[in-house]
Structure formats: structure tokens, C-alpha cells
Amino acid sequence: MSNQKIEPSKVTKPIQLVAAWLVGLVLVNGAFLGAAVGISEPVWLRGTLVIASVVNVPVFLLAIFMLQTKFRPQLQEDEYYSKYLDKSTSEYVVVSKDESILSAITEIKAELVTIIDDKSGKCNETPEILSIQAGGWSPHYKVALCDYLPDFESIRAELKKNNISINKIFGQSTTKNVPEFNHLSFSRDVNFRTKVAVLRILTKYNFDGYAYAVSNDVNPEEIYIGGFGYMNGGFFPINSELKALLDSDVEPSDLDYFEQKTEKIKP
């Protein structure tokens, strides 16, 4: 038994923790029984060690039973647990991934949109802006709308008026928790012109701010209008300065500068 060693750094999943507990039970009970065999006096101490090793077993089994019933979702792999949280709380949960991979994927998607723009021969305006003007929302970006927003019906009508397709309506059907803040959330791969177009349309409503997030398989939409779980890092306020900026001939550097100098609002 002395050669067995549990390395905490290698215990990375919940089910591995249960296995580590089992190994710990065997080691502890083995130590208790081994000590009981080696102790001759006092007799009561030997009995105590034997009783303790016996009691450890049903306690361990009870703990496993509770984990398998009350905490079963938490024992699943990260991906399944994140989906469980997403459905039960309507909060966005990021599964740990290599940030460099996420960054590379975002850059590739942005490059693909640029290539499509170049081939269409309309480099001055993105397909999204042209689609809004022409009467159709580009399939590049999916939009999700929260029905807890005070201006939900007006925003819904405004989006339809501007030919922006709503991919999903969420909120009341999945949770009773009303969002504390009303904000917009953009995926990092949403291009500048599309982001500005959406902000210009929606800043007249009572939104507190906007934030950035990473879309994934659980929440694939790139634009969330009234989200729940994207505020961990705070959000940029929609204030008079931003509205004045959007009313002007804004460039990417202008918006970047606004975000650099503006302190985020953190719940």
C-alpha cells in the first residue's frame, strides 16, 4: 500500500474524485485494521479501530448514493454538465477550452466572412448591412431574443421591420429568474458593421449595455438581445457618449477607443 499515491493534479473530473474516495477508503480502513492487529494494549483501542473501519463502509456507500441521486448531473462530463446548467438556469456556462483554439476559430470565421464579401464584389459593405437594406437577414449570424425584456414586443417588431430574423426566443419558458440587467451580447466573430447596425437599431430601447461572449454548441447564437449569463466580466454601458458615437460616421478604432476608456459595469 505504501507505493500507492493519489496525485491531485490528475484528478480532473468528478467521477475520478469518486474513485479517489474509494482508494482513500481502502487506505484508511487498511491503516485502521493494520494498527488494530499491531496494538495489544489497550484492548478498547483495538475495538475502536475495528469499529471505525466498519462504520466507514456504510458512510461511504451513503455518500455514493447521494451523489448518484441528488448530484448526478454534476458527475457527468463537463459538456453534459454545462448543458444541464444551461437548461436549468438559462445561464451561459463556458466549458474550459484552450483559449488559443477559440481565438483561432474566431479568426478563421472572420476571414471566411471577409472572403465571401470580396467574392460578392461588395467590399465596402458587409452582407449583413446589405441584407438589412435589401430585405433579408444574412444567415451568418443567429439572433436570440429574451421575452423578459420590458420592450419585448416593440423590439420584436423593430427587428422584423429591419428584416432581422430571430433564431430563438428564450426566457420565460426556461426560467423564472428575471434578468437584473437588460443588455446585448455579441459573439467575438460578429463583424464591426453588423454590430454597429444592431446597436443603432436597439439603443433607443432601455438597454443597460452590451458585452462580448464566445458562441458554442450549447448557445450557438452570435447575438443575444437580453441575455442571462454573459455578465461575469461586466458590460459596456450604453450611454450618451456611445449614442453620439453611433450617430456619427463611426469607425472600428472609434468603438475600440470607447471600450478602452470606458469602465465596465459589473453586477
Image (cartoon, grey):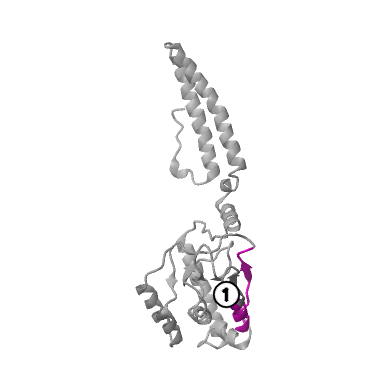
Is 225 contained in the magenta span?
no
Badge 1 crowding class, 10 Å Cα cut-off, few under 14, some 14 to 19, many 20 or more, is few
Residue tagged 1 = 151
At horizontal 60% and vertical 78% (from top left) the residue drawn is 154
Please, is residue 106 above or below residue 127 in the view? above
The kind of residue tagged 1 is Asp
Q: Is mark 1 on a helix, strand or loop?
A: loop
- Residue nearest the observer in this picture, 184 or 154: 154
**53 relative to 251 in the view: left or right:** right
Can you tell which quarter of the image residue 161 is in?
A: bottom right
Along the line of sight, the residue nearer the viewer: 2 or 22: 22
Residue at 37 percent of width and 73 percent of height: 262
Relative horizontal placement of residue 251, taking residue 69 as reference (left or right): left
> Which region of the structure is painted magenta?
154-172
Q: Is residue 85 above or below residue 169?
A: above
* Image x and y of residue 62, in percent: 58, 33
**Residue 81 location in percent, x, y?**
57, 52
Any magenta on residue 171? Answer: yes
